[in-house]
Image (cartoon, rainbow, N blue to C red):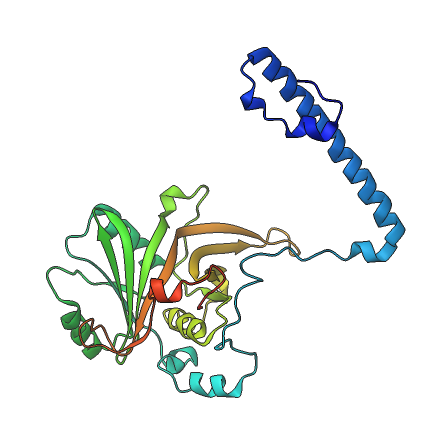
């Protein structure tokens, strides 16, 4: 069983040895030999680095799905005048330019559970001035008509299945669009260690990595829930971070114990959104026209292809 060649010893499969004592002995030898080989490799690398000098300091870029993703034709370049012109005239421009303040309604699916109520309470805290609408047996179209007449700008509908929060519909009023998201990884304040309590002021909004035309449209739609005039005295931040088309929401308060090193305190809730479709106009699943819809078989052809 013993071998004079170190590499062959490392390659030997310990699990194939029936004798427990021999198996343990070989495992110990392999572990010791691997550590020795690793040390020799580090030593060689150090010698090579000293020989190369400054060149060795240039680190190789680690390849990830994010930095090797397929190039999207709709990628927005900073300073694009065409995109800038469209944004100045889109459905969110009045709110994001400060001409109009957002008024948000939050409601649930039929027969909401306790976890639904708890989540909605926390969403209402995140979006100051938002109001809860008791769903009862009202259809979405009827709710849209009623709250549009009352001057509300957005409707959020949280859905659940067997007491599991699983979807979120966001309708921008009065003319749309409507976004439908898969909702996952919901954590309430009580589930977050050392979670703080938010102050009822409008937070700053941070949008990360919404780089395509679709991504920027979705980002502006989410940002319009909060308006363009945050209250900096509250030191609250609502972050929507897009990574591989998953939108991670986090809510923080920043604290200046040290002027040079502020720290963050997480506030609830936290959750993840995945866009399923974006529809023109207000909610209409039968006759509505879709701006974008996620078709898995046709669109998920590569692990490096992303849309936001």
Number of disc labels: 0
Residue at the spot 40% in from the left edge and 71% down from the top edge = 218
Can residue 89 be seen in the rendering of this structure? yes
Q: Position of residue 71 (x, y in %)?
A: 53, 71
Q: Is residue 273 above or below residue 26?
A: below
Task: Indicate left or right for 61 with 131 as reference.
Answer: right
Q: Quadrant of the C terminus?
A: bottom left
Task: Kindly give the residue lying farthest to the left in the view shown.
Answer: 137
Task: Kindly give the residue lying farthest to the right in the view shown.
Answer: 51
Q: Position of residue 73 (x, y in %)?
A: 49, 77
Q: Position of residue 227 (x, y in %)?
A: 40, 73
Q: Is residue 17 above or below residue 307?
A: above
Q: Quadrant of residue 158?
A: bottom left
Task: Indicate left or right for 43 with 73 as reference.
Answer: right
Q: Position of residue 69 (x, y in %)?
A: 53, 64
Q: Quadrant of the N terminus?
A: top right
Residue at the spot 59% in from the left edge and 11% down from the top edge = 21
Task: Indicate left or right for 3 with 91 as reference.
Answer: right
Q: Is residue 58 above or below residue 194?
A: below
Residue at the spot 16% in from the left edge and 74% down from the top edge = 146
Q: Quadrant of residue 102?
A: bottom left
Query: Between residues 205 and 5, which one lies in front from this camera angle?
Result: 5
Can residue 127 be seen in the rendering of this structure? no
Query: Between residues 201 and 33, which one lies in front from this camera angle?
Result: 33
């Amino acid at each position: 069983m013993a071998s004079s060649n170190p590499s062959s010893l490392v390659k030997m499969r310990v699990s194939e040895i029936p004798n427990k004592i021999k198996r343990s002995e070989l495992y110990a030898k392999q572990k010791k030999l691997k550590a020795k080989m690793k040390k020799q490799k580090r030593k060689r690398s150090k010698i090579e680095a000293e020989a190369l000098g400054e060149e060795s300091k240039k680190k190789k870029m680690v390849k990830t799905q994010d930095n090797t993703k397929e190039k999207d034709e709709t990628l927005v370049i900073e300073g694009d005048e065409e995109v800038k012109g469209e944004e100045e005239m889109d459905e969110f421009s009045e709110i994001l330019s400060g001409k109009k303040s957002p008024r948000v309604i939050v409601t649930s699916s039929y027969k909401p559970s306790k976890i639904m109520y708890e989540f909605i309470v926390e969403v209402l805290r995140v979006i100051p001035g938002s109001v809860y609408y008791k769903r009862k047996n009202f259809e979405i179209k009827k709710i849209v008509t009623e709250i549009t007449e009352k001057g509300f700008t957005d409707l959020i509908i949280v859905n659940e299945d067997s007491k599991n929060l699983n979807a979120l519909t966001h309708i921008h009023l009065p003319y749309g669009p409507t976004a439908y998201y898969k909702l996952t990884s919901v954590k309430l304040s009580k589930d977050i260690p050392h979670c703080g309590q938010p102050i009822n002021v409008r937070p700053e909004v941070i949008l990360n990595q919404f780089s395509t035309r679709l991504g920027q449209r979705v980002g502006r739609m989410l940002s319009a829930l909060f308006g363009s005039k945050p209250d900096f005295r509250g030191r609250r931040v609502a972050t929507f971070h897009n990574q591989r088309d998953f939108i991670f929401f986090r809510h923080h308060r920043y604290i200046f114990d040290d002027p040079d090193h502020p720290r963050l305190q997480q506030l609830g809730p936290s959750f993840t959104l995945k866009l399923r479709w974006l529809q023109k106009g207000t909610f209409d699943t039968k006759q509505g026209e879709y701006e974008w819809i996620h078709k898995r078989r046709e669109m998920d052809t590569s692990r490096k292809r992303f849309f936001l």
